[in-house]
Image (cartoon, rainbow, N blue to C red):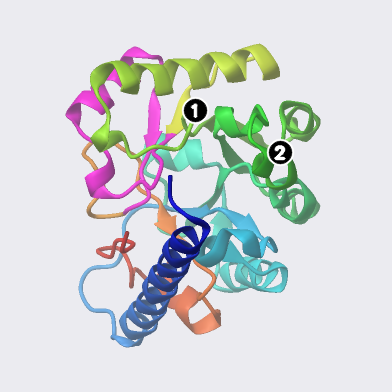
Amino acid sequence: MLKKGAKAVLRSVGLQREQIAATRMAVERATLASIPRTGAKRQWGRILAYHSVGQPRTGVNDVSLRRFERQLDIAIELGFEFVSALQIAHTGGEPNQLAITVDDAWTSAAENIAPIVRKRGLPWSLFVVSGWSDHADDWTRKDILNWSQLKDLMGGDLEIGSHSVSHPDFSKLTPDQVKLELEVSRDGIAENLGFVPKSFAIPYGQSANWNAMAHELARSAGYDTIYSQAERTGFPGTAPRTFVTKFDNDRIFRALLNGAFDSWEEWV
C-alpha cells in the first residue's frame, strides 16, 4: 500500500495535470474562436452538450448559472429555435435549430437547469449514469441525482436516456463489458423510471471513445439513437453534439454556434 506522503504526491500531480489540461482547453477555445469562419454555411441543426450548471465540482464541464441563461438569450437573439435532440438526431434539423442535452445527471440538472428551460418552454435531454444514480458511492450522494429525484424530474419536454453504468471509455472494454454497461444501464432506467430508454450518449464521446463493436452492441441493446460529443470527427452513425465548457463566454459561444469547434475534440 502507498504511504500517506506518496498518496499526497499523486493527488498533487493529478491536480497539476487537470490544471494543465484546463489551461490548454481555455487557450485552444479562445484561439479557435478568433479565427474567421469561411466556407459553406451549416445545413443542419446543432445539439449542445452540457454537463452541469452552477456546480463547480465538475471543473471545465461546469457552466455558471448566469452564463447558461446568457447563452440561451444569445441563441434566441441570433434567431435560433430550440427543438428536441431527437428531432435533430433523426432528421438532421434545420440550420437555425438547436437542442439542449445534459450528461451525467448532476444535481444541478434539477436545481438549476430544469427550472430555466421549463420557464422558457424548451425541450431538453438528460443522460443518466445508472451506477452513479444508484448512490452506491459516497460522493454520488452529494453530487448526483438519485432515482427518486430523477422520477420527480420526469415529464414535460424532457427525454431521459442512458449514459452507461459507470462512465467508462468504451474503446477499452471487452465485448462482455460493453454489453454489461449498455444493458444494465438500460434495465436500471426501466426498473427505476418505468420506461426503456432508446437513446444513449457515449461517455467522453470523442472519436477515440467508441468503435464498431460498441456501436453494433448498442444497436442490439435497443438504442436507436446514439449521441457522440464531437461534430465532424464523431463515429459514423452517431448523432453529433457540440461540447459547451466553462470557458465559453459570449464571444466564444457565438463562435461555437458558428462552427468554430466543429473539428475540435477535447484533450483527454
Disc 1 to disc 2, C-alpha distance: 14 Å
The image's mark for residue 47 is: none
Closer-to-camera residue (119/43): 119
Find out whether residue 220 is within the magenta segment.
yes
- Specify start and end residues of the magenta stretch as a single range: 201-230
Residue 40 located left or right of residue 195: left
Name the secondary structure under disc 1. loop
Q: Is residue 267 above or below residue 234?
A: below
Residue 212 located left or right of residue 262: left
Question: Residue 54: x percent and y percent?
Answer: 70, 64
Question: Residue 231: x percent and y percent?
Answer: 30, 54
Counting residues from the start of the chain, the first of labels 1 and 2 encountered is: 2
Q: Which residue is mark 1?
A: 165
**Which quarter of the rendering shows the C terminus?**
bottom left
Q: Which residue is mark 2?
A: 145
Closer-to-camera residue (23/246): 23
**Occupied quadrant, residue 28:** bottom left
Q: Is residue 165 above or below residue 1?
A: above
Question: Residue 31: x percent and y percent?
Answer: 33, 85
Q: Is residue 174 visible?
A: yes
Residue 143 located left or right of residue 104: right
**Which quarter of the rendering shows the N terminus?**
top left
Q: Amino acid at mark 1?
A: Val
Q: Amino acid at mark 2?
A: Leu
Find out whether residue 10 is within the magenta segment.
no
Image point (51%, 75%), residue name: 248
Image point (39%, 38%), residue name: 202
Closer-to-camera residue (24/213): 24
Image point (30%, 50%), residue name: 206
